[in-house]
Amino acid sequence: MDFNAKHTRAILQFFVLIFLSVAGILGAYNFKAIRQFFIGAAGQEANIVIQTDNVQGTLSRPWRNLAQGGEDKNWRLGPLTNQVKVLNTEYIRIDHLTDFYDIVHGTSGNLSYDFSKLDPIIADIRAAGATPFLSLSYMPLAFATNGDITAPPANWGDWQNTTRAIIEHVSGTLNIPNVYYEVWNEPDLFGGYKTYGSRNYLTMYTYAAQGAKQARVKQPYKFGGPAVTALYQNWVDALVKLSIDQNLPLDFFSWHRYSTSIDTFRSDVSTVHNWLAPYPSKQNIELLITEWGHDPKNNAGYDNNFGAIHTMAVSTEFVDLINRAFLFEIQDGKDPAGNVHWGRWGIFDSTGAPKPRYNALRFLEKLGSQKLQLLGRGTWVKGIAAKDGEDTTALIINYDSQSRHIETTPVTFTGITPGNFIITEQYFGKSPIERPVATTSGELRIAIPFEVNSAVFLRLHHL
C-alpha cells in the first residue's frame, strides 16, 4: 500500500471515530437526531390520543366525490358502476359536456339540443348512487369560433341559451335534484382566460349565469366556478364581486390542486377563507376542489401504494375543512404505447381493474359515522377516529412525500369502560389481525409500528 493510500485510510478512520463518538453522545440524549441525519429534516413524531367519549358530530366525508376527464369521448361508467357504488360516491363530475356529447346542433342564433348521448352517462351516474356534477365545457362546435372549442364564441347569447337548455333538461326534464353546474374547466389553461381582456372569464360566467337564471326548473341546483388550475386571489375577488354587483348566482367556488404536500391542501382552504372575509354575503359559499391528486402529470405513484397512502392522508385532512373534493379520476385512458399501467390518474386501469387508490377509498369507508376527537398528530403520522355503534374505529396513516419516514406510534384510547376488548389491526393491503386486550382503567395504550408510507385501520370492540 503506497503512502497516499495509507494517508487516506488514516483520515477516514479518524472521521469514523469522531462520528462514532458524537453518535454515542447523541445516542445517550437524542437518538432521533442520528436518525434524522440519515432520513431527512426534523419533524414531530405522533402521539395519538383517541377520546372515545368525545363525539363531535357526524363524520363528514368530502372524499366521496369522483371526477372523470376527457380520456375517451365514448367512455361509460358501465361495468364499473357497482364498484363505484360500493364507495358510497355522492357526486361524479364530468367535463367536456358540450363537445363530447353532441348536445348542440344548428347554427348561431338557430340552435337545437339533443341529449341522447349525455343521458346514458347521467343514467350510469345515477345507477352508481351518485348525483351528476356537470362542468359546462367546452364550446359546442355548432358555434365555436373557427372550430376552436376553447375560444370565446362570436355570439355569447348562444352560450347563455345552451346553459339554460342543459339546466332545464337535467334539473327539469330528468328531474334530478341538487345537481352542480360549474362554469368551464381550468379556464386559465384551456383557453387562456383571465379576469379581464378579450378572453375574460367573467364574460363567460355572466352569460352562463344569466342562462341559469332563465332556466325554469322545479328541482334545486347549485351554480358556480371557476375550476381554475390553482388558487388565485384575483379570481376570487373578481368572481365574488361580479356575483354581488350583478346579482348572479355563486353557490360555490372551485379550484384544482395537485400536490404531494398535505399542508398545501390545508393552506388552500385557509387562504380562501381569508380572501372571502371582506365579502360577508359570500363567506359561507361552498368550497370545492373539483380535481385533486399528487401530480398533474402522469406519475408512477398513481399505479402503486404511494398514491393510495397520499389519498388517505389528504382525505382525512379534508374532514371539516372543505365541502367536497373530487378525486381525479375514475378510469385511465389507453396508453398509446399499449401499457396497462402508465402512471395515469385513474382509480381503475384501462381494463377496468382497480388500482391501489380505489382500495384506499374502500379503506376510508371502514370508518364509523360519528367523529371522535383525535389528538397528537405528527409531521408524518395523522389520522381520524369515529364511533361505529359501540365500537371505536380509526384510520392512522404514515405519509412521507420523500418515502423515507418510519416510526412506532403510541395510540391511546381514553374514556373507555374497563374490561376486556378485541382490537382489530389491519394494515393497508394486508389481512386483519385480531387480538384480545384488557384494561382495569379508563385508558388503553398500544403501539403501532409504521413502515414507509403505510396505513392501519383499528377497531376497538368491548366484549
Image (cartoon, helix red, strand yellow):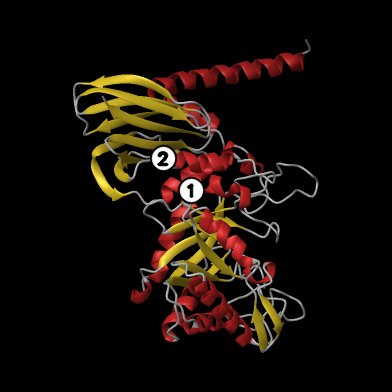
Looking at this view, is 211 or 384 the one in front? 211
Please provide percent x and percent y for residue 239: 49, 77
* Residue carrying label 2: 382
Looking at this view, is 267 or 451 the one in front? 451
Please provide percent x and percent y for residue 432: 45, 26
Q: Quadrant of residue 26?
A: top left
Please provide percent x and percent y for residue 227: 55, 66
> Which quarter of the figure is the C terminus placed in?
top left
Q: CA distance from mark 2 to mark 1?
A: 10 Å
Residue 262 is marked as 1
Tag 1 secondary structure: helix
- Could you classify mark 1 by the number of other residues whose Cα lies within 10 Å: few (under 14), some (14-19), or many (20 or more)? many
Which one is earlier in the sequence, the residue at label 2 or at label 1? 1
Vertical position of residue 244 compared to residue 231: above or below: below
- Left or right of 432? Residue 155 is right
Please provide percent x and percent y for residue 125: 54, 57
- Kindly indicate whether the residue at mark 1 contacts the one at mark 2 (C-beta within 8 angstroms): yes
Vertical position of residue 98 compared to residue 298: above or below: below
Tag 2 secondary structure: strand
Q: Residue at x 52, y 53 (%)?
A: 128
